[in-house]
Image (spheres, helix red, strand yellow):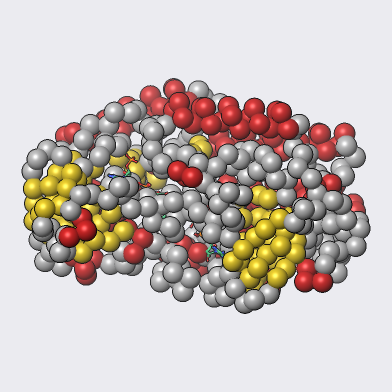
Amino acid sequence: MRISLYTGPGFLLGWDVMTVDSENGRAAPGEPPHACIIGAGSSGIAAAKALFERGIPFDCFEKSDRVGGNWVFANKNGMSAAYRDLFINTSRPRMEYSDFRMPEFYPDFPHHTQIAAYFDAYVDHFGFRDRITFETGVEHATREPDGRWVLELDNGQTRRYDALLVANGHHWNPRWPEPAFPGSETFPGEQLHAHSYRDNSIFAGKRVVVLGMGNSAMDIAVESSYVAERTYLAARQGVWIVPKYVFGKPIDQIRNDPRVPFKVRQRVMQQLLRTYSGPPERYGLPKPTHRFGEAHPTVSGRILDRLQHGTIIPKPNISAFEGSQVRFLDASAEKADVVVYCTGYKITFPFFEDDFISAPENRIELFRRVFHPDIPNVFFIGLLQPLGAIMPLAETQGAWVGDYLLGDYAPPPAAELRADIEADQTAMHERYVASKRHTIQVDFDDYLNALARERRAGAERARAKGFRPPAQCRPSAAITAS
Ligand SMILES: Cc1cc2nc3c(=O)[nH]c(=O)nc-3n(C[C@H](O)[C@H](O)[C@H](O)COP(=O)(O)OP(=O)(O)OC[C@H]3O[C@@H](n4cnc5c(N)ncnc54)[C@H](O)[C@@H]3O)c2cc1C
Ligand SMILES: NC(=O)c1ccc[n+]([C@@H]2O[C@H](COP(=O)([O-])OP(=O)(O)OC[C@H]3O[C@@H](n4cnc5c(N)ncnc54)[C@H](OP(=O)(O)O)[C@@H]3O)[C@@H](O)[C@H]2O)c1
């Protein structure tokens, strides 16, 4: 079957669509690289679609029996953090892929069941479901001296590939307070992480402490406040709380032109928030020590209402547990039955050896959050925290990697690439509050614009090189670090 969807220069090579015969070795010289995608969440399927429409042979391995990852409630992979009443906090037009709209009847902020159904429909619409191997986890990924990837699957099989796309998600490995609070080991009540929270039945009639000021803490404190005897919201630092709507429309649909300097946009948003809801201190929350846009946004249309009605009581950070009491940093103490740690997640790649590729303290240095500076045939999809939704960014990243594998994009020289990574890291550290949750931040529109520019520049470089697929990923070539 000839591929006819893709119209970039690589198409002129007229590669055939094929299934990967990776068990028996590599493809013949001249064929495009054989790729593997780990994970079929919203990032993995976006990358799969990009490779599929470019005629790049690939396998996608997915632990679960379905696509959608985090958005599948009670996902049998055990990795989803979705709770029964989870709704997205990035609005529908921000979250949908560029060429597949969510149904018109969906609300502005759909329920997780609608989001999961949308990802399912995406795969069927573009017709690549048969390229995903379900209920098959990648246990181990190593790189042979010639650069080929060797993947060990949990069904005992071993597969070989020329390129590896990692889309295993970064919101499934809970980060508990480090170190644990003194006395927590003898607390007689229940302690859980937001990742295992499913619904508020566990709070009925209880005294609940919710720790954190991110989006999990907001949702879970609000849910608790309807059924618990008491709900305390403990924070180690203040945040700006962003409403879901302003001026009658989702706040993330307000024009955010990347050509306007960030400082100007920041000032406008800060003023908007102050006018709309006043400072967080008015609700008893800690005063933020940063300006808007210097922390991952905490979005909630409901938390201020519940605070105003006294159904959630703000507290500073926990200092210790004393029997069944929780002591806070202001020296107050409250009896508690349940403590929910909404303290974030660890970026983890269990299939790589730690000394090969890992993200200690959630840090991993990549060129524009995708390309590894030392390993030319591994790519990361959806490994970013946007001020906005992840899906359209993962879609663009997939297309970018697809272009690269076809020879339609060439990266900058190694020194330039490293300098870019360094500049990116410096800018992020200068702007954001120091926290393990601010290591992969991007601004949605700015990032898309920057990738578009980079892809154009890389297409020019590729043209100068005669649109040759990267030697490092070509099936017949020995692969060396660039
Ligand atoms: C409670 C919550 C709410 C959120 N709300 C939003 C929101 O409103 N908007 C937004 O943009 N983002 C939101 N996020 C961020 C979330 O990360 C993204 O929405 C999205 O799930 C990212 O998709 P992903 O494919 O990168 O990861 P995931 O959805 O985690 O999918 C990863 C997939 O990889 C598979 N996998 C992992 N390891 C392996 C392996 N070794 N072998 C085979 N398969 C593997 C998993 O089974 C899974 O299917 C939210 C996160 C949480 C926790
Ligand atoms: N409705 C939705 O769409 C929804 C709901 C939930 C989550 N999400 C998304 O899921 C992702 C994860 O969100 P999250 O809220 O679970 O995690 P998060 O954004 O990483 O927030 C973690 C919070 O816990 C605090 N914290 C961490 N360690 C602590 C400690 N030892 N003591 C006290 N406080 C501590 C952090 O404070 P510091 O800032 O000081 O580090 C931060 O306030 C985000 O992308 C979020 O947008 C979306």
Which of the two residues, 425 or 456, is positioned nearer the viewer here?
425
In the rendered view of the protein, which quadrant contains the C terminus?
A: top right
Q: Residue at x 52, y 27 (%)?
A: 426
Write the residue at 26% across / 37% down: 237
- The quadrant where residue 126 appears: bottom right
Quick check: can you spot residue 43? Answer: no
Tell me what residue is drawn at x 52 percent, y 49 percent: 390
Q: Toward the viewer: 249 or 179?
A: 179
The N terminus - image quarter? bottom right
The location of residue 100, given as percent across then percent down, is 60, 58
x and y, in percent, of residue 442 in the image: 51, 38
Nearer-the-camera pick, 106 or 441? 441
Q: Is residue 109 left or right of residue 67?
A: left
Q: Is residue 362 visible?
A: yes
Which residue is drawn at the image coordinates 21% and 35% (left, top)? 286
Q: Position of residue 224 (x, y in %)?
A: 20, 59
Q: Is residue 163 above or below residue 437?
A: below
Q: Position of residue 198 (x, y in %)?
A: 31, 67
Q: Quarter-wise, where is residue 317 in the image?
A: top left
Q: In the drawing, does residue 181 fall left or right of residue 143? A: left
- In the shown orientation, is residue 336 left or right of residue 42? left
The number of discs equals 0
* Snapshot quadrant of residue 331: top left
